[in-house]
Image: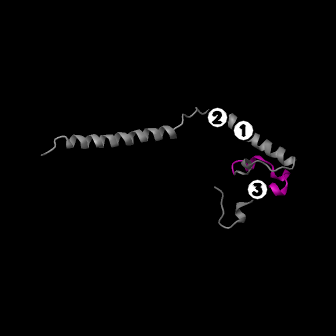
Amino acid sequence: MFDLTFPYHLSKLQSEWVFAFYRCSVEAMDALLVEAEPTKTVTEPEKVAQENAVAETAMKRLQSGFAPPREIYDIRNRGRINWGCAPAWAWPTDPELFEGGHEG
């Protein structure tokens, strides 16, 4: 005898699979997406002040005999410090010394 409820059960099973996948996806996204705190927009004067603070910190550390912070070796910050006043061991390396080397 032909069972008329078979297509109904099949579609119910399929819908359970779809909803299970949907629930897992939603739970995974909830776990991954953390509510981000609003970021503060940094104005240009504040940005310049932060960059100058890195240079001042580097000079103070160099005068005390300590290594400068890593940020000062970044290509954008190298020009902010007078390397002639710094000890030779603290000078950044010249990328032209190395064959095929570049900074990026």
Q: Which residues are magenta?
A: 75-91
Q: Secondary structure at mark 3?
A: loop
Assess whether mark 1 and mark 2 are in contact (beta carbons under 8 angstroms).
yes
Q: Is residue 56 above or below residue 74?
A: above
Residue at the image point whose x is 37% and y is 41% from the top: 20
| Label 1 sits on residue | 50
Name which residue type carries label 2.
Val
- 85 falls in the magenta region: yes
Residue 18: percent from the left, percent from the top?
34, 42
At mark 2, the secondary structure is: loop
Q: Which residue in the protein does label 2 denote?
A: 42
Task: Classify residue 11 as left or right of residue 61.
Answer: left
Q: Which residue is mark 3?
A: 92
Measured as percent of width and height from the top left, residue 23 is found at 40, 38
Q: CA distance from mark 2 to mark 1?
A: 10 Å
In the rendered structure, which amino acid carries the disc numbered 1?
A: Gln
What's the colour scheme?
Answer: one colour
Crowding near the residue tagged with mark 2, few <14, some 14–19, many ≥20 C-alpha atoms within 10 Å: few
Q: Are marks 1 and 3 in contact (CB under 8 Å)?
A: no
Q: Relative to residue 41, is residue 32 drawn left or right?
A: left
